[in-house]
Amino acid sequence: MEAALSVRPEAVGVRVTKTLLEVLKDAGHPPPAVDFGLAMLAQALGLPPGAGATLFAIGRAAGWVEHVLEQREQRHLLRPRGRYVEPAPTPRGTVSGWSPRRDECSPVGMTP
């Protein structure tokens, strides 16, 4: 974000984004992710719409390639502890924690 402010602080998109960041910070929100700053920089540089997302994807892909190369070199997975466990299936048309019995889902103070 500092890079965008140093490149073109007068750009409308950069000024609006800076103001938005200040309002969010004053309201106690956490700082935004890196893609927010990248979008701000793309705006400051006058890049076409979508260029920030493209640059983010290229950077992410480069990181994935590096992980693959490192794993091949070490001949094992870098994070073998991560394992996806699929949640138990629910019957079609049901909502978890909800009972179709009228006496369990009637509005407060009303009888079925």
Image (cartoon, rainbow, N blue to C red):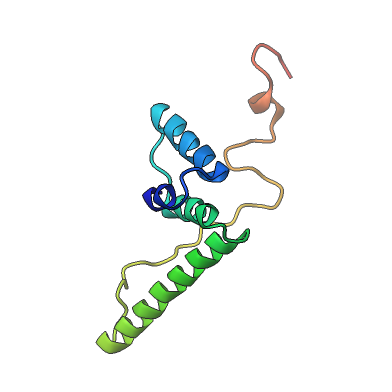
Q: Is residue 95 left or right of residue 21?
A: right
Estimate the x, y position of residue 64 in percent, counting from the top left.
Answer: 41, 75
Residue ranking furthest to the left: 74
Based on the displayed image, in which of its 4 quarters is residue 71 positioned?
A: bottom left
Foreground of the two, 42 or 56: 42
Foreground of the two, 104 or 93: 93
Residue 51 versus residue 14 in the image, above or below: below
Residue ranking furthest to the top: 109
- Residue at x 39%, y 50% (from the top left corner): 6
Estimate the x, y position of residue 92 in percent, counting from the top left.
Answer: 70, 52
Instruction: Locate the C terminus and report the quarter of the image it occupies.
Output: top right
Q: Is residue 63 left or right of residue 44?
A: left
User: How many numbered circles are shown?
Assistant: 0
- Residue at x 44%, y 51% (from the top left corner): 4
- Residue at x 49%, y 50% (from the top left corner): 40
Based on the displayed image, in which of its 4 quarters is residue 30 positioned?
A: top left
Foreground of the two, 112 or 35: 35
- Residue at x 44%, y 69% (from the top left corner): 59
Residue 97 versus residue 85 in the image, above or below: above
Residue 99 versus residue 67 in the image, above or below: above
Q: Is residue 90 left or right of residue 77?
A: right
Estimate the x, y position of residue 79 in percent, counting from the top left.
Answer: 31, 71
Q: Is residue 101 left or right of residue 40?
A: right
